[in-house]
Image (cartoon, rainbow, N blue to C red):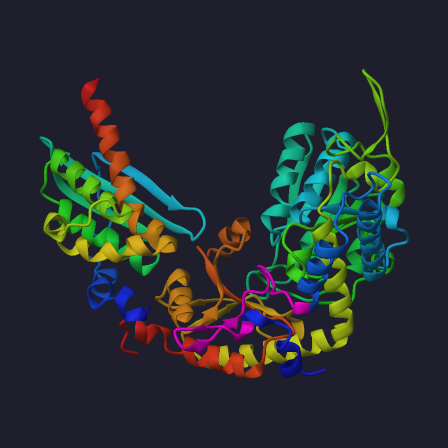
Amino acid sequence: MDIKQLYTDLILEYNQDATNRRTIENPTVHEHGHNPNCGDDIDISMVVENGVIKDIAYTGSGCAISQASTAMMMELVKGRTLEEARHLVNLFLGMIRGDVTDDSQLEELEAACTLKDISKMPVRVKCAVLAWHTLDMILDRLGKDKKK
Amino acid sequence: MNTEIIRKDFPILKQEVNGHPIVYFDNAATTQRPEPVLRAVYNYDITGNGNPHRGAHVLAISASQAYDGSKETVRDFIHAASVEEIIYTRNATESLNLIERSYAETHLKKGDRILITIAEHHSNLVPWQRACEKTGAELDYIYVDKETGHFREEDLAKIDDPRVKIFSFAQVSNVLGIDFDPVPLIERAHRHGAIVIMDGAQGAPHKHTDVQALDCDFYTFSGHKMCALTGIGVLYGKKALLEEMEPFLRGGDMIEQVKEQETTFAPLPARFEAGTQYTEGAVSLAAAINYLQHIGFDFIREQERKLTARALEGMKQISFVHIVGPDNPEEKEGLIAFTVDGVHPEDVAQILSADGICIRTGHHCAEPLHTYLGINSTCRASFYFYNTEDEVDYFLDKLAQVRKVMGYRD
Protein backbone atom coordinates (compact mmCIF):
# COMPACT_ATOMS: atom_id res chain seq x y z
CA MET A 1 0.00 0.00 0.00
CA ASP A 2 1.19 3.52 -0.76
CA ILE A 3 1.70 5.36 2.47
CA LYS A 4 -0.23 8.35 1.04
CA GLN A 5 -3.40 6.22 1.02
CA LEU A 6 -3.21 6.03 4.80
CA TYR A 7 -1.81 9.46 5.61
CA THR A 8 -4.13 11.42 3.34
CA ASP A 9 -3.86 15.19 3.30
CA LEU A 10 -7.11 15.33 5.25
CA ILE A 11 -5.76 13.09 8.02
CA LEU A 12 -2.51 15.04 8.19
CA GLU A 13 -4.49 18.27 8.40
CA TYR A 14 -6.72 17.02 11.23
CA ASN A 15 -3.69 15.54 12.99
CA GLN A 16 -2.30 19.03 13.33
CA ASP A 17 -5.67 20.69 14.01
CA ALA A 18 -5.58 22.00 17.57
CA THR A 19 -9.07 23.56 17.67
CA ASN A 20 -10.37 21.18 20.34
CA ARG A 21 -7.04 20.18 21.84
CA ARG A 22 -7.49 22.07 25.09
CA THR A 23 -8.89 21.75 28.61
CA ILE A 24 -12.41 22.72 29.66
CA GLU A 25 -13.04 24.27 33.07
CA ASN A 26 -15.82 22.50 34.99
CA PRO A 27 -16.90 19.95 32.39
CA THR A 28 -20.14 18.03 32.87
CA VAL A 29 -18.30 14.81 32.31
CA HIS A 30 -14.76 13.65 31.77
CA GLU A 31 -13.26 10.32 30.66
CA HIS A 32 -9.83 8.82 30.06
CA GLY A 33 -8.98 6.59 27.08
CA HIS A 34 -5.81 4.52 26.76
CA ASN A 35 -4.22 2.07 24.32
CA PRO A 36 -1.80 0.13 26.48
CA ASN A 37 0.31 -1.22 23.65
CA CYS A 38 1.11 1.91 21.70
CA GLY A 39 0.77 4.47 24.46
CA ASP A 40 -2.08 6.49 22.91
CA ASP A 41 -3.60 8.41 25.76
CA ILE A 42 -6.48 10.88 25.71
CA ASP A 43 -8.68 12.73 28.17
CA ILE A 44 -12.04 13.88 26.86
CA SER A 45 -14.07 16.58 28.61
CA MET A 46 -17.57 17.54 27.64
CA VAL A 47 -20.12 20.19 28.59
CA VAL A 48 -23.74 19.05 28.23
CA GLU A 49 -26.72 21.36 28.52
CA ASN A 50 -30.32 20.16 28.04
CA GLY A 51 -29.13 17.03 26.33
CA VAL A 52 -26.94 18.91 23.84
CA ILE A 53 -23.14 18.74 23.61
CA LYS A 54 -22.24 22.41 24.07
CA ASP A 55 -18.50 21.86 24.15
CA ILE A 56 -16.07 18.97 23.81
CA ALA A 57 -12.27 18.98 24.01
CA TYR A 58 -9.34 16.67 24.60
CA THR A 59 -5.79 16.54 25.84
CA GLY A 60 -3.22 13.78 25.55
CA SER A 61 -1.02 12.25 22.93
CA GLY A 62 -1.28 9.66 20.23
CA CYS A 63 -0.43 8.76 16.68
CA ALA A 64 -1.68 10.72 13.68
CA ILE A 65 -4.58 8.35 13.12
CA SER A 66 -5.83 8.60 16.70
CA GLN A 67 -5.32 12.38 16.85
CA ALA A 68 -6.99 13.00 13.50
CA SER A 69 -9.86 10.68 14.37
CA THR A 70 -10.34 12.51 17.68
CA ALA A 71 -10.34 15.92 16.01
CA MET A 72 -12.83 14.72 13.36
CA MET A 73 -15.12 13.28 16.02
CA MET A 74 -15.14 16.46 18.08
CA GLU A 75 -15.92 18.62 15.09
CA LEU A 76 -18.75 16.24 14.22
CA VAL A 77 -20.50 15.89 17.58
CA LYS A 78 -20.21 19.42 18.90
CA GLY A 79 -23.69 20.97 18.97
CA ARG A 80 -25.45 17.59 18.57
CA THR A 81 -27.83 15.97 21.02
CA LEU A 82 -26.61 12.99 23.05
CA GLU A 83 -28.88 10.71 20.98
CA GLU A 84 -27.37 12.00 17.74
CA ALA A 85 -23.89 11.54 19.15
CA ARG A 86 -24.74 7.95 20.09
CA HIS A 87 -25.98 7.26 16.59
CA LEU A 88 -22.78 8.71 15.07
CA VAL A 89 -20.53 6.72 17.40
CA ASN A 90 -22.35 3.51 16.48
CA LEU A 91 -22.12 4.37 12.80
CA PHE A 92 -18.37 5.06 13.02
CA LEU A 93 -17.65 1.88 14.99
CA GLY A 94 -19.79 -0.06 12.51
CA MET A 95 -17.77 1.39 9.63
CA ILE A 96 -14.45 0.45 11.24
CA ARG A 97 -15.72 -3.06 11.98
CA GLY A 98 -16.59 -3.29 8.31
CA ASP A 99 -20.31 -3.78 9.08
CA VAL A 100 -21.43 -0.54 7.42
CA THR A 101 -19.89 -0.05 3.97
CA ASP A 102 -22.50 2.00 2.11
CA ASP A 103 -20.90 5.38 1.36
CA SER A 104 -24.22 7.20 1.26
CA GLN A 105 -24.93 6.04 4.82
CA LEU A 106 -21.42 7.02 5.93
CA GLU A 107 -21.69 10.57 4.59
CA GLU A 108 -23.20 11.54 7.93
CA LEU A 109 -19.77 11.04 9.49
CA GLU A 110 -18.43 13.97 7.43
CA ALA A 111 -14.60 14.06 7.58
CA ALA A 112 -14.49 10.90 9.71
CA CYS A 113 -15.84 8.79 6.86
CA THR A 114 -12.39 9.10 5.24
CA LEU A 115 -11.12 6.69 7.93
CA LYS A 116 -13.16 3.91 6.31
CA ASP A 117 -10.09 2.11 4.92
CA ILE A 118 -8.68 1.69 8.44
CA SER A 119 -11.09 -1.25 8.70
CA LYS A 120 -8.65 -3.07 6.38
CA MET A 121 -5.67 -2.31 8.62
CA PRO A 122 -6.15 -4.34 11.80
CA VAL A 123 -3.11 -2.90 13.58
CA ARG A 124 -4.39 0.66 13.27
CA VAL A 125 -8.02 0.02 14.20
CA LYS A 126 -7.29 0.62 17.88
CA CYS A 127 -5.87 4.06 17.01
CA ALA A 128 -8.93 5.11 15.01
CA VAL A 129 -11.50 4.01 17.56
CA LEU A 130 -9.91 5.26 20.79
CA ALA A 131 -11.75 8.59 20.98
CA TRP A 132 -15.02 7.05 19.79
CA HIS A 133 -14.89 4.31 22.42
CA THR A 134 -14.12 6.92 25.04
CA LEU A 135 -17.13 8.97 23.94
CA ASP A 136 -19.19 5.78 23.97
CA MET A 137 -18.24 5.29 27.64
CA ILE A 138 -19.19 8.90 28.40
CA LEU A 139 -22.59 8.42 26.77
CA ASP A 140 -23.13 5.21 28.73
CA ARG A 141 -22.39 7.04 31.93
CA LEU A 142 -24.67 9.97 31.13
CA GLY A 143 -27.42 7.50 30.19
CA LYS A 144 -27.14 5.74 33.54
CA ASP A 145 -27.09 9.02 35.47
CA LYS A 146 -30.24 10.08 33.65
CA LYS A 147 -32.09 6.87 34.63
CA LYS A 148 -31.27 7.46 38.29
CA MET B 1 32.54 -14.84 7.74
CA ASN B 2 30.60 -12.22 5.81
CA THR B 3 26.99 -11.12 5.80
CA GLU B 4 26.47 -11.78 2.12
CA ILE B 5 26.99 -15.50 2.68
CA ILE B 6 25.16 -15.51 6.00
CA ARG B 7 22.06 -13.90 4.48
CA LYS B 8 21.66 -16.82 2.10
CA ASP B 9 20.70 -18.88 5.16
CA PHE B 10 17.73 -16.60 5.89
CA PRO B 11 15.04 -17.03 3.22
CA ILE B 12 12.76 -14.46 4.86
CA LEU B 13 15.26 -11.67 4.22
CA LYS B 14 14.87 -12.17 0.47
CA GLN B 15 11.27 -10.94 0.61
CA GLU B 16 10.21 -7.60 -0.78
CA VAL B 17 7.65 -5.12 0.56
CA ASN B 18 6.14 -2.69 -1.98
CA GLY B 19 9.12 -3.42 -4.22
CA HIS B 20 11.66 -2.74 -1.47
CA PRO B 21 13.80 -5.49 0.04
CA ILE B 22 12.69 -6.15 3.59
CA VAL B 23 14.94 -4.60 6.24
CA TYR B 24 14.44 -6.42 9.51
CA PHE B 25 15.46 -4.21 12.44
CA ASP B 26 13.24 -5.74 15.11
CA ASN B 27 15.67 -8.35 16.35
CA ALA B 28 15.25 -7.44 20.01
CA ALA B 29 11.61 -8.56 19.67
CA THR B 30 12.35 -11.77 17.80
CA THR B 31 15.03 -12.91 15.37
CA GLN B 32 14.74 -14.69 12.03
CA ARG B 33 15.54 -18.38 11.60
CA PRO B 34 18.25 -19.73 9.34
CA GLU B 35 17.71 -22.77 7.17
CA PRO B 36 20.02 -25.04 9.24
CA VAL B 37 17.69 -24.50 12.24
CA LEU B 38 14.56 -25.15 10.21
CA ARG B 39 16.15 -28.22 8.65
CA ALA B 40 17.13 -29.60 12.05
CA VAL B 41 13.50 -29.39 13.19
CA TYR B 42 12.27 -30.92 9.94
CA ASN B 43 14.78 -33.75 10.16
CA TYR B 44 13.76 -34.48 13.71
CA ASP B 45 10.11 -34.54 12.70
CA ILE B 46 10.61 -36.86 9.74
CA THR B 47 13.06 -39.25 11.39
CA GLY B 48 13.04 -39.05 15.17
CA ASN B 49 9.74 -37.82 16.60
CA GLY B 50 8.46 -39.59 19.69
CA ASN B 51 7.70 -38.73 23.29
CA PRO B 52 10.97 -38.27 25.15
CA HIS B 53 11.54 -40.24 28.37
CA ARG B 54 8.50 -42.46 27.75
CA GLY B 55 8.54 -45.93 26.30
CA ALA B 56 11.27 -48.18 25.02
CA HIS B 57 10.67 -48.06 21.29
CA VAL B 58 13.06 -46.64 18.76
CA LEU B 59 11.30 -43.27 18.34
CA ALA B 60 10.93 -42.70 22.08
CA ILE B 61 14.66 -43.24 22.31
CA SER B 62 15.55 -40.93 19.43
CA ALA B 63 13.28 -38.25 20.91
CA SER B 64 14.98 -38.65 24.30
CA GLN B 65 18.37 -38.36 22.65
CA ALA B 66 17.34 -35.22 20.76
CA TYR B 67 15.87 -33.65 23.89
CA ASP B 68 18.64 -34.57 26.31
CA GLY B 69 21.32 -33.89 23.71
CA SER B 70 20.06 -30.35 23.27
CA LYS B 71 20.49 -29.78 27.01
CA GLU B 72 24.18 -30.53 26.74
CA THR B 73 24.46 -27.98 23.92
CA VAL B 74 22.74 -25.36 26.09
CA ARG B 75 24.90 -26.24 29.10
CA ASP B 76 28.04 -25.80 27.05
CA PHE B 77 26.69 -22.56 25.53
CA ILE B 78 26.30 -20.77 28.88
CA HIS B 79 29.06 -22.79 30.60
CA ALA B 80 26.85 -24.24 33.31
CA ALA B 81 28.42 -26.87 35.56
CA SER B 82 25.90 -29.59 34.70
CA VAL B 83 22.81 -30.32 32.61
CA GLU B 84 20.86 -30.68 35.85
CA GLU B 85 21.02 -26.90 36.03
CA ILE B 86 19.32 -26.40 32.65
CA ILE B 87 15.50 -26.25 32.80
CA TYR B 88 13.44 -25.76 29.68
CA THR B 89 10.55 -23.32 29.78
CA ARG B 90 8.50 -21.51 27.14
CA ASN B 91 10.60 -18.34 27.31
CA ALA B 92 12.49 -16.04 29.66
CA THR B 93 9.16 -14.80 31.05
CA GLU B 94 8.18 -18.28 32.16
CA SER B 95 11.67 -18.84 33.59
CA LEU B 96 11.35 -15.71 35.72
CA ASN B 97 7.85 -16.71 36.82
CA LEU B 98 9.18 -20.11 37.82
CA ILE B 99 11.76 -18.45 40.09
CA GLU B 100 9.06 -16.19 41.50
CA ARG B 101 6.70 -19.07 42.32
CA SER B 102 9.17 -21.73 43.36
CA TYR B 103 11.81 -19.62 45.07
CA ALA B 104 10.62 -16.11 45.97
CA GLU B 105 7.22 -17.05 47.39
CA THR B 106 8.70 -19.69 49.66
CA HIS B 107 11.84 -17.84 50.74
CA LEU B 108 10.78 -14.23 51.29
CA LYS B 109 9.02 -12.72 54.28
CA LYS B 110 7.78 -9.34 55.45
CA GLY B 111 10.64 -6.86 55.74
CA ASP B 112 12.65 -8.46 52.92
CA ARG B 113 13.35 -6.60 49.73
CA ILE B 114 13.49 -7.44 46.07
CA LEU B 115 15.72 -5.09 44.11
CA ILE B 116 15.42 -4.61 40.36
CA THR B 117 16.21 -1.74 38.00
CA ILE B 118 13.80 0.74 36.45
CA ALA B 119 14.93 -0.46 33.03
CA GLU B 120 13.46 -3.96 33.43
CA HIS B 121 11.18 -5.63 30.93
CA HIS B 122 7.75 -6.38 32.42
CA SER B 123 8.79 -10.04 32.57
CA ASN B 124 11.36 -9.15 35.22
CA LEU B 125 9.03 -6.79 37.07
CA VAL B 126 5.42 -7.95 37.19
CA PRO B 127 6.29 -11.35 38.76
CA TRP B 128 8.11 -9.53 41.60
CA GLN B 129 5.03 -7.46 42.32
CA ARG B 130 3.24 -10.75 42.88
CA ALA B 131 6.02 -12.03 45.14
CA CYS B 132 5.62 -8.88 47.23
CA GLU B 133 1.83 -9.29 47.40
CA LYS B 134 2.23 -12.90 48.54
CA THR B 135 5.02 -12.44 51.07
CA GLY B 136 4.85 -8.83 52.28
CA ALA B 137 8.31 -8.12 50.87
CA GLU B 138 8.96 -4.77 49.21
CA LEU B 139 10.00 -4.03 45.65
CA ASP B 140 12.69 -1.39 45.21
CA TYR B 141 14.36 0.05 42.14
CA ILE B 142 17.76 1.17 40.98
CA TYR B 143 17.05 4.21 38.80
CA VAL B 144 19.05 5.39 35.85
CA ASP B 145 20.41 8.84 35.12
CA LYS B 146 17.86 10.40 32.77
CA GLU B 147 20.57 11.86 30.54
CA THR B 148 23.11 9.06 30.30
CA GLY B 149 20.87 6.05 30.94
CA HIS B 150 23.46 4.58 33.32
CA PHE B 151 22.54 3.34 36.81
CA ARG B 152 22.63 6.11 39.37
CA GLU B 153 25.64 5.65 41.61
CA GLU B 154 23.70 6.50 44.78
CA ASP B 155 21.06 3.87 43.92
CA LEU B 156 23.64 1.12 43.47
CA ALA B 157 24.21 1.39 47.23
CA LYS B 158 20.77 -0.26 47.61
CA ILE B 159 22.44 -3.53 46.59
CA ASP B 160 24.37 -3.48 49.88
CA ASP B 161 21.20 -3.39 52.00
CA PRO B 162 21.08 -6.73 53.87
CA ARG B 163 17.28 -6.69 53.58
CA VAL B 164 17.70 -7.27 49.82
CA LYS B 165 17.19 -11.00 49.34
CA ILE B 166 16.71 -11.04 45.58
CA PHE B 167 18.52 -8.82 43.11
CA SER B 168 17.33 -9.24 39.54
CA PHE B 169 18.39 -7.29 36.46
CA ALA B 170 18.63 -7.51 32.70
CA GLN B 171 22.02 -8.32 31.23
CA VAL B 172 21.11 -5.77 28.54
CA SER B 173 18.09 -3.44 28.76
CA ASN B 174 15.80 -3.85 25.76
CA VAL B 175 15.32 -0.07 25.59
CA LEU B 176 18.56 1.55 26.74
CA GLY B 177 20.79 -1.19 25.30
CA ILE B 178 23.69 -0.35 27.57
CA ASP B 179 26.69 -2.65 27.72
CA PHE B 180 27.94 -2.92 31.31
CA ASP B 181 29.96 -5.26 33.49
CA PRO B 182 27.53 -7.01 35.86
CA VAL B 183 30.19 -8.85 37.89
CA PRO B 184 30.84 -6.09 40.48
CA LEU B 185 27.08 -5.79 41.08
CA ILE B 186 26.71 -9.54 41.53
CA GLU B 187 29.60 -9.61 43.98
CA ARG B 188 28.10 -6.80 46.02
CA ALA B 189 24.76 -8.60 46.33
CA HIS B 190 26.45 -11.86 47.24
CA ARG B 191 28.43 -10.22 50.03
CA HIS B 192 25.34 -10.25 52.22
CA GLY B 193 23.85 -13.42 50.82
CA ALA B 194 21.25 -12.11 48.32
CA ILE B 195 20.54 -14.28 45.32
CA VAL B 196 21.15 -12.73 41.91
CA ILE B 197 19.02 -13.30 38.83
CA MET B 198 20.17 -12.19 35.40
CA ASP B 199 17.62 -11.84 32.62
CA GLY B 200 19.71 -12.71 29.59
CA ALA B 201 16.97 -12.32 26.97
CA GLN B 202 18.92 -9.50 25.27
CA GLY B 203 22.32 -10.82 26.32
CA ALA B 204 22.65 -14.50 25.44
CA PRO B 205 21.87 -13.97 21.73
CA HIS B 206 24.60 -11.38 21.32
CA LYS B 207 27.52 -12.08 23.62
CA HIS B 208 29.59 -14.84 25.05
CA THR B 209 27.99 -15.74 28.39
CA ASP B 210 29.57 -17.80 31.16
CA VAL B 211 27.23 -18.23 34.11
CA GLN B 212 29.97 -19.64 36.30
CA ALA B 213 32.30 -16.72 35.64
CA LEU B 214 29.41 -14.31 36.26
CA ASP B 215 28.47 -16.32 39.35
CA CYS B 216 24.80 -15.35 39.01
CA ASP B 217 22.40 -17.70 40.79
CA PHE B 218 19.81 -17.81 38.03
CA TYR B 219 20.02 -16.91 34.36
CA THR B 220 17.11 -16.80 31.91
CA PHE B 221 16.77 -16.43 28.15
CA SER B 222 14.46 -17.11 25.19
CA GLY B 223 15.26 -19.21 22.13
CA HIS B 224 13.33 -17.09 19.64
CA LYS B 225 15.60 -14.11 20.21
CA MET B 226 18.54 -16.18 19.02
CA CYS B 227 17.37 -17.90 15.83
CA ALA B 228 15.44 -20.77 17.47
CA LEU B 229 11.68 -21.39 17.32
CA THR B 230 9.27 -19.49 19.55
CA GLY B 231 8.11 -21.36 22.63
CA ILE B 232 11.42 -22.63 23.98
CA GLY B 233 13.25 -20.82 26.77
CA VAL B 234 15.83 -21.63 29.39
CA LEU B 235 16.17 -21.29 33.11
CA TYR B 236 19.64 -21.85 34.48
CA GLY B 237 19.87 -22.18 38.24
CA LYS B 238 22.64 -23.23 40.57
CA LYS B 239 22.03 -26.84 41.49
CA ALA B 240 21.97 -26.23 45.25
CA LEU B 241 19.18 -23.67 44.82
CA LEU B 242 17.13 -25.69 42.35
CA GLU B 243 17.30 -28.74 44.59
CA GLU B 244 15.64 -27.03 47.50
CA MET B 245 12.91 -25.42 45.36
CA GLU B 246 9.31 -26.53 45.07
CA PRO B 247 8.26 -27.91 41.67
CA PHE B 248 6.57 -25.25 39.52
CA LEU B 249 4.08 -27.31 37.51
CA ARG B 250 3.06 -30.82 38.47
CA GLY B 251 2.15 -33.82 36.35
CA GLY B 252 3.82 -36.37 34.13
CA ASP B 253 7.58 -36.82 33.84
CA MET B 254 8.43 -34.70 36.88
CA ILE B 255 7.68 -37.48 39.35
CA GLU B 256 9.61 -40.26 41.02
CA GLN B 257 6.70 -42.17 42.54
CA VAL B 258 3.02 -41.32 42.67
CA LYS B 259 0.65 -42.76 45.25
CA GLU B 260 -3.02 -42.00 45.76
CA GLN B 261 -2.36 -39.27 48.30
CA GLU B 262 1.25 -38.23 47.78
CA THR B 263 4.07 -37.95 45.28
CA THR B 264 7.83 -37.86 45.37
CA PHE B 265 9.53 -35.87 42.66
CA ALA B 266 12.07 -36.67 40.00
CA PRO B 267 15.62 -35.38 40.32
CA LEU B 268 16.78 -32.28 38.41
CA PRO B 269 16.10 -31.13 35.80
CA ALA B 270 12.96 -33.24 35.19
CA ARG B 271 11.25 -32.10 38.39
CA PHE B 272 10.75 -28.69 36.78
CA GLU B 273 9.60 -30.04 33.43
CA ALA B 274 6.09 -31.39 33.84
CA GLY B 275 4.25 -32.88 30.88
CA THR B 276 5.43 -33.76 27.40
CA GLN B 277 8.10 -31.27 26.53
CA TYR B 278 8.57 -29.18 23.41
CA THR B 279 11.14 -31.39 21.74
CA GLU B 280 11.08 -29.53 18.39
CA GLY B 281 11.81 -26.35 20.33
CA ALA B 282 14.71 -28.02 22.11
CA VAL B 283 16.04 -29.30 18.80
CA SER B 284 15.75 -25.83 17.28
CA LEU B 285 17.54 -24.25 20.21
CA ALA B 286 20.48 -26.64 19.97
CA ALA B 287 20.65 -26.08 16.22
CA ALA B 288 20.51 -22.30 16.73
CA ILE B 289 23.33 -22.43 19.27
CA ASN B 290 25.43 -24.53 16.89
CA TYR B 291 24.67 -22.06 14.12
CA LEU B 292 25.60 -19.00 16.23
CA GLN B 293 28.79 -20.68 17.37
CA HIS B 294 29.63 -21.45 13.77
CA ILE B 295 29.13 -17.75 12.92
CA GLY B 296 31.11 -16.91 16.05
CA PHE B 297 30.28 -14.48 18.82
CA ASP B 298 33.29 -12.33 17.95
CA PHE B 299 31.84 -11.77 14.50
CA ILE B 300 28.33 -11.22 15.91
CA ARG B 301 29.58 -8.58 18.35
CA GLU B 302 31.73 -6.86 15.78
CA GLN B 303 28.98 -6.72 13.17
CA GLU B 304 26.42 -5.38 15.66
CA ARG B 305 28.85 -2.73 16.88
CA LYS B 306 29.61 -1.62 13.34
CA LEU B 307 25.90 -1.30 12.53
CA THR B 308 25.07 0.45 15.80
CA ALA B 309 27.90 2.95 15.35
CA ARG B 310 26.86 3.74 11.79
CA ALA B 311 23.19 4.11 12.75
CA LEU B 312 23.96 6.33 15.76
CA GLU B 313 26.25 8.51 13.69
CA GLY B 314 23.58 9.00 11.03
CA MET B 315 20.73 9.52 13.50
CA LYS B 316 22.68 12.23 15.29
CA GLN B 317 22.81 14.13 11.98
CA ILE B 318 18.99 14.23 11.76
CA SER B 319 17.97 17.19 13.90
CA PHE B 320 14.46 15.91 14.74
CA VAL B 321 15.59 12.45 15.89
CA HIS B 322 16.40 11.94 19.58
CA ILE B 323 18.17 8.89 20.91
CA VAL B 324 17.01 7.46 24.25
CA GLY B 325 19.95 6.51 26.46
CA PRO B 326 23.58 6.91 25.47
CA ASP B 327 24.42 7.78 21.87
CA ASN B 328 28.03 6.69 22.15
CA PRO B 329 28.45 3.39 20.27
CA GLU B 330 31.10 2.22 22.73
CA GLU B 331 28.46 2.02 25.46
CA LYS B 332 25.78 0.37 23.34
CA GLU B 333 24.63 -3.08 22.46
CA GLY B 334 22.94 -3.46 19.09
CA LEU B 335 19.70 -1.63 19.79
CA ILE B 336 18.67 2.01 19.60
CA ALA B 337 15.46 3.48 21.02
CA PHE B 338 14.55 6.89 19.66
CA THR B 339 11.83 9.47 19.13
CA VAL B 340 10.99 11.81 16.26
CA ASP B 341 9.79 15.36 16.95
CA GLY B 342 6.12 15.77 16.11
CA VAL B 343 5.62 12.25 14.78
CA HIS B 344 4.22 9.54 17.01
CA PRO B 345 6.30 6.30 17.05
CA GLU B 346 3.37 4.35 15.62
CA ASP B 347 3.35 6.65 12.59
CA VAL B 348 7.14 6.48 12.23
CA ALA B 349 6.93 2.69 12.13
CA GLN B 350 4.03 2.73 9.67
CA ILE B 351 5.85 5.07 7.30
CA LEU B 352 9.07 3.03 7.46
CA SER B 353 7.08 -0.17 7.02
CA ALA B 354 5.78 1.05 3.66
CA ASP B 355 9.44 1.06 2.58
CA GLY B 356 10.00 -2.44 3.94
CA ILE B 357 11.70 -1.40 7.18
CA CYS B 358 10.59 -3.25 10.32
CA ILE B 359 11.14 -1.46 13.63
CA ARG B 360 9.37 -1.76 16.96
CA THR B 361 7.24 0.90 18.63
CA GLY B 362 5.52 1.36 21.94
CA HIS B 363 6.97 1.00 25.40
CA HIS B 364 8.65 -2.32 24.56
CA CYS B 365 7.19 -3.97 27.67
CA ALA B 366 9.07 -1.45 29.82
CA GLU B 367 6.29 0.97 30.79
CA PRO B 368 7.76 2.05 34.16
CA LEU B 369 11.00 3.06 32.39
CA HIS B 370 9.08 5.15 29.86
CA THR B 371 7.02 6.75 32.61
CA TYR B 372 10.19 7.51 34.58
CA LEU B 373 11.82 9.06 31.52
CA GLY B 374 8.64 11.03 30.81
CA ILE B 375 8.17 9.53 27.35
CA ASN B 376 4.91 7.98 26.23
CA SER B 377 6.47 5.58 23.77
CA THR B 378 9.53 5.19 21.57
CA CYS B 379 10.68 3.63 18.32
CA ARG B 380 13.39 0.98 18.45
CA ALA B 381 15.76 -0.32 15.80
CA SER B 382 17.64 -3.46 16.82
CA PHE B 383 20.27 -5.30 14.81
CA TYR B 384 21.59 -8.80 14.43
CA PHE B 385 24.59 -10.23 12.63
CA TYR B 386 22.68 -10.68 9.35
CA ASN B 387 21.94 -6.97 8.99
CA THR B 388 24.14 -4.86 6.73
CA GLU B 389 25.53 -1.35 6.55
CA ASP B 390 23.56 -0.80 3.33
CA GLU B 391 20.38 -1.52 5.29
CA VAL B 392 21.40 1.02 7.93
CA ASP B 393 22.00 3.65 5.23
CA TYR B 394 18.63 2.90 3.65
CA PHE B 395 16.95 3.19 7.07
CA LEU B 396 18.67 6.53 7.74
CA ASP B 397 17.59 7.86 4.37
CA LYS B 398 13.94 6.93 4.99
CA LEU B 399 14.02 8.12 8.60
CA ALA B 400 15.18 11.55 7.41
CA GLN B 401 12.00 11.82 5.29
CA VAL B 402 9.49 10.86 7.97
CA ARG B 403 8.47 14.40 8.90
CA LYS B 404 8.00 15.30 5.26
CA VAL B 405 5.61 12.38 4.78
CA MET B 406 3.61 13.67 7.76
CA GLY B 407 3.12 17.03 6.09
CA TYR B 408 5.77 19.07 7.90
CA ARG B 409 7.65 21.56 5.75
CA ASP B 410 10.99 21.71 7.59
Viewport quadrant of the C terminus of chain B: bottom left
Can you say whether B52 is above or below B395 in the image? above
Q: Nearer the viewer, residue A2 or B117?
A: A2
The residue lying at 19 percent from left, 43 percent from top is A91
Q: Position of residue B17 (x, y in %)?
A: 43, 72
Task: Decide if residue B311 is in sight here.
Answer: yes
Q: Position of residue A70 (x, y in %)?
A: 25, 51
Numbered range of the magenta stretch: B13-35
Can you say whether A97 is above or below B10 in the image? above
Q: Nearer the viewer, residue A57 or B346?
A: B346
The residue lying at 78 percent from left, 38 percent from top is B272
Q: Position of residue B327 (x, y in %)?
A: 57, 73
B202 sits left or right of B350 in the view: right
The residue lying at 21 percent from left, 39 percent from top is A90
B11 sits left or right of B20 in the view: right
Viewport quadrant of the N terminus of chain B: bottom right
Find out whether residue B247 is within the magenta segment.
no
Can you say whether B201 is above or below B312 in the image? above
A106 sits left or right of B323 in the view: left
**Quadrant location of residue B276?**
top right
The residue lying at 13 percent from left, 33 percent from top is A83
Find out whether residue B18 is within the magenta segment.
yes
Task: Decide if residue B237 is in sight here.
Answer: no
Q: Position of residue B315 (x, y in %)?
A: 49, 77
Determine the main secondary structure of the stretch shown in magenta: loop
Q: Nearer the viewer, residue A102 or A146?
A: A102
